[in-house]
Each structure stands twice: as structure tokens, then as C-alpha cells.
Image (spheres, helix red, strand yellow):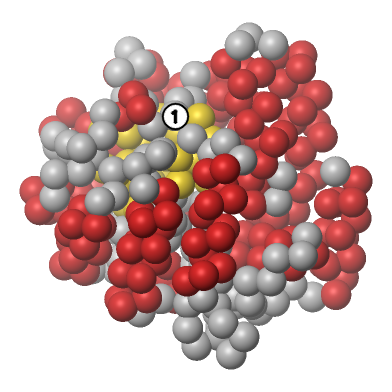
């Protein structure tokens, strides 16, 4: 493994994938600028090609372009965790191998399937990817987007049985799940919060980091929240969270690519619309988001 999981902590920022005005190509210049801004404002890691990055709507050539651009811009300053998820095990392996060759530090893998997967099938999927790459793998549980729900028991079993499965990102918003993971492993399995509205509780519970698209719009409060919890300043953390919470709830409810791209445009950074079938944020949503950003 190229990066110890102990180095992956704090604010793990998810950049959007900018498209050109016609939506047909990735705007690598704008992607590079976004990634640079996230690193410059203090993100502890960068995670391209998750839900925020519209990875499900990219061709393989576009996927590779995002990987190359991101890794090149970051240039080793912080870890890069590439979302390598795909419908098939074979293409998940292809993406993982490409990310490893490009210089990524870890992979994030969400099991995605048309058919409901059994625990045996999920474990085989992760084991097959792990056997093909040398990078640590963050098992990503987000049934709202993937349709696949991994229990704490399954996640812990894969952590025990599969060498490269080294971290868990929990996005269900159910605090009892991370508590169960801690209980089953004695805290040996690092877990990361992927549910924006749950972030304060998850960090207080011991999450190693917060995987979030929010730093695209409000980087400093995200960093301040993590630091306050880490330093035991929980009343300060609560104040920061209460300030952030309306924005966090809005961007999740409206869909991260749609809302974050609209927010960036409102802040003067045009990154194109999300790719169909996703649509740009409607006028009512833009008005509400503009108010949230203005209040901030």
C-alpha cells in the first residue's frame, strides 16, 4: 500500500467534474483550478469521481482524464482517493488499476448493481478488486444511491478477511452503524462520515474524517468544525455545525452535482451543468441557495 490509512483523515473534499459549455467534454482547466483551490484552502485529502463528481455518467476515457488531472494537480501534497466504482467487477478493476498507475493513494468503492447483491457477492466483488491492486480500499456504503446496503457485520468481516479493505465510509446517516463498527472491531477499523447532516455526531463518535462536497462552497467552516471536534471544543463545534447545517441539508436534498455546481456558479465559478439525465438547479432552488450562501 502506498499510503497508510492513518494519513487519511480530516476533510476529504469531493470536487465536481466541470464540463464545457456544450456538456460534451471535461473542462480540465477548470477541474485543475477547483482541485488546486480545495488543496490550497486546507482539504486534508481529495476524492474525485464519487457521486459529486458524476462518475456514473462518464465514459472510461473521461474517468481516466479526471484521475490524471487530479493526481497531477495534487502532486503528492495530500492523499488522492479515487472513486473507482462501476456496475461490473471487471470495470471496477480496470478503474482501480488505472488509478493506481496514475499515482492515486487509495480507492473508494461503492458496490453498484442492477440485481440485489448477496453478502457473498459483495464480498467476492471487493476481494476481486483487492487482489488486482495494491492500494488501500475504502468500502463505501450508500444504499440511497447504489441500492446495495452493507451491514456493519459484513463491513467488519471484509476488513478482517480482505487485506486491502482498510476503511469504511458510512453514508446512511445512521449513527448506530458506526457505533456497531467500533464495537465489533474495538476501534481498529477507521470509519469516515459520508452523511453531511450527521457530521457533528459522527466526528464526535470518532470518525477519522468527513467525506464531503461542502468545501467547494464553504471550505473554512468545514475545516473549523473538524478542528473543533478534534480539539474537544464541542460547544464551538456545535455553533459551527448549526451555521453550516442548512447548507448541508440543501445540497444533499437537491443532489450534490446539481446543487454544488449551481453554488459554484453563484460564487462566480462556472463549471457547466450536470450531465443528463441530471438537470441544472431550477430557479426556486437557485434563489434558496443564493440566500444560504449570502447568509454564510
**Total numbered labels placed on residues in the image:** 1
x, y percent for residue 55: 42, 67
Q: Residue at (39%, 19%) from the top-left corner?
A: 182
Report whether 214 appears left or right of 121.
right
Q: From the viewer's perspective, is 24 left or right of 62?
A: right
Does residue 230 appear anywhere in the picture?
yes
Which one is in front, 41 or 251?
41
Q: Quadrant of the C terminus?
A: top right
Above or below 73: residue 188: above
Q: Position of residue 72 (x, y in %)?
A: 36, 56
At 86% from the left and 60% from the top, the residue drawn is 290
Q: Position of residue 141 (x, y in %)?
A: 41, 46
Q: Residue furthest left?
A: 131
Q: Residue at x 26, y 29 (%)?
A: 4
Would you name the residue on which mark 1 appears?
9
Q: Residue at x 56, y 27 (%)?
A: 202
- Quarter of the image for the N terminus: give it: top left
* Quadrant hosting residue 197: top right
Q: Would you identify the image quadrant in which residue 258 lies?
A: bottom right
- In the rendered structure, the answer to whether residue 32 lies left or right of residue 4 reads right
Instruction: Rate crowding at label 1 as few (under 14), some (14 to 19) or many (20 or more) other CA atoms within 10 Å.
Output: many
89 to the left or right of 21:
left
Q: Quadrant of residue 180?
A: top left
Report the front residue among 4 and 202: 4
* Residue 193 visible from this viewpoint: no
Tell me: residue 118, above or below residue 5.
below
**Front-most of 65 and 247?**
65
* Residue 208: percent from left, percent from top: 45, 26
As helix, strand or loop, the secondary structure at mark 1 comes to loop
Amino acid at each position: 500500500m502506498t499510503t497508510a490509512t492513518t494519513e487519511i483523515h480530516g476533510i476529504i473534499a469531493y470536487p465536481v467534474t466541470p464540463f464545457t459549455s456544450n456538456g460534451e467534454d471535461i473542462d480540465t482547466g477548470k477541474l485543475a483550478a477547483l482541485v488546486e483551490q480545495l488543496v490550497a484552502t486546507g482539504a486534508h485529502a481529495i476524492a474525485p469521481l464519487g457521486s459529486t463528481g458524476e462518475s456514473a455518467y462518464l465514459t472510461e476515457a473521461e474517468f481516466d482524464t479526471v484521475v490524471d488531472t487530479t493526481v497531477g494537480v495534487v502532486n503528492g501534497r495530500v492523499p488522492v482517493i479515487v472513486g473507482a466504482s462501476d456496475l461490473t467487477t471487471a470495470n471496477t478493476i480496470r478503474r482501480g488499476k488505472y488509478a493506481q498507475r496514475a499515482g492515486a493513494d487509495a480507492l473508494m468503492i461503492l458496490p453498484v448493481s442492477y440485481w440485489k447483491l448477496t453478502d457473498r457477492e459483495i464480498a467476492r466483488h471487493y476481494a476481486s478488486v483487492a487482489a488486482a491492486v495494491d492500494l488501500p480500499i475504502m468500502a463505501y456504503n450508500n444504499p440511497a444511491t447504489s441500492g446495495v446496503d452493507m451491514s456493519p457485520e459484513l463491513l467488519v468481516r471484509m476488513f478482517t478477511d480482505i487485506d486491502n479493505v482498510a476503511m469504511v465510509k458510512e453514508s446512511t446517516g445512521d449513527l448506530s452503524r458506526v457505533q456497531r463498527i467500533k464495537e465489533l472491531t474495538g476501534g481498529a477499523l477507521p470509519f469516515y462520515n459520508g452523511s453531511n447532516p450527521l457530521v457533528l455526531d459522527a466526528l464526535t463518535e470518532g470518525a477519522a474524517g468527513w467525506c464531503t462536497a461542502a468545501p467547494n462552497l464553504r471550505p473554512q467552516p468545514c475545516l473549523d468544525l473538524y478542528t473543533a471536534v478534534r480539539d474537544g471544543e464541542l460547544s464551538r463545534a456545535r455553533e459551527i455545525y448549526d451555521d453550516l447545517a442548512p447548507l448541508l441539508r440543501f445540497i444533499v436534498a437537491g443532489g450534490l452535482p446539481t446543487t454544488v455546481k449551481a453554488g459554484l456558479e453563484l460564487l462566480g465559478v462556472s463549471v457547466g451543468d450536470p450531465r443528463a439525465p441530471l438537470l441544472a438547479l431550477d430557479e426556486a432552488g437557485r434563489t434558496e441557495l443564493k440566500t444560504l450562501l449570502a447568509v454564510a
